[in-house]
Amino acid sequence: MFRRSLALPAALVAIGCTLAAPAALAARVHVRVEGKTQTIFGAAEPTLTVKDNALDALESASLAGEFFYHVTQSGFGPYVDQIGRYPAGGSNGWVFKLNGIAPPVGADKVTLHDGDTVLWYWATFSGPLTLEIENSIVRGKRCFFATGRNDAGHASRVRNVVFTLNSRRVSSRTGVVCTTVARYAIRVSKVGAIRSRLYSAA
């Protein structure tokens, strides 16, 4: 009887180990947070280890960049009502895009996979474009082209922008700037749009 009473817990422990749910797998994703007036985290979209979803991506970025954010519970689920110094209010607030597209679900419902890109940004809820940069060699010069991606992920050329090339600001009415072939760290911005990530071009 004594031996059987010891064997039973051992069997239960073995069964419990067999039936335990596997731990959630983390994803390695690119994360950036664009604030109302400046980049809060990840100008070059660094890769972070994220537990599961887009809300977890913000948590990972907050830990890496040591910035504040706050989540409140609403009837639709968790809602990010502040990042950095700016709380949401009126028609302004914090939203996100996954791989350049604004999902129709909450941040906690978006499962991430390795290589995904999560962008959190301040918005006026009027569908701001997310700026990107393309480049090519034209007649012996390196030319940079500003494009804007809408919430559905469609890209188009953008005019009247400001490029920052190695800390030098260059305004462009056409959305294009051409310069000598060299190594550049470049971004593009425009009032009412989400500034681009920091690109490196050689």
Image: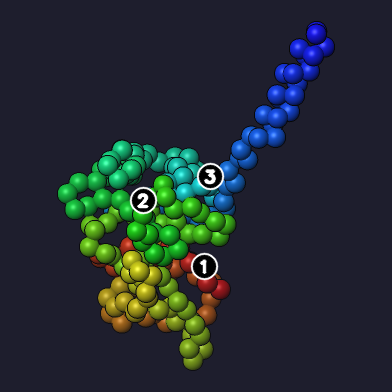
Given this view, does label 2 or label 1 mark the residue nearer the observer? 2
Residue pictured at 48% horizontal, 88% vertical: 138
Give the Cα separation between the discs numbered 1 and 3. Answer: 28 Å
Where is residue 162 shown, x and y percent of the image?
32, 70
Q: Are marks 1 and 3 in contact (CB under 8 Å)?
A: no
Where is residue 192 shown, x and y percent of the image?
25, 64
> What kind of element bears circle 2?
loop
Q: Name the residue under label 3.
A: 51
Given this view, does label 3 or label 2 mark the residue nearer the observer? 2
Residue pictured at 27% horizontal, 56% vertical: 123
Q: Name the residue under label 2.
A: 106
Is residue 162 among the parts visible in the rendering?
no
Q: How crowded is mark 3: few (under 14 residues within 10 Å), some or many (20 or more)?
A: some
Q: What residue type is labelled 2?
A: Gly
Give the Cα separation between the discs numbered 3 and 2. Answer: 16 Å
Residue 173 appears in which quarter of the rendering?
bottom left
Residue 161 appears in which quarter of the rendering?
bottom left
Q: Name the residue under label 1.
A: 200
Q: What residue type is labelled 3?
A: Lys
> What kind of element bears circle 3?
loop
Earlier in the chain: of badge 2 and badge 1, it is: 2
Q: Residue 145 carries which label?
A: none
Of residues 190 and 22, the one drawn nearer to the viewer in this rendering: 22
In this rendering, position of residue 30 left or right of residue 2? left
Q: How crowded is mark 1: few (under 14 residues within 10 Å), some or many (20 or more)?
A: few
Residue 160 to residue 81: above or below: below
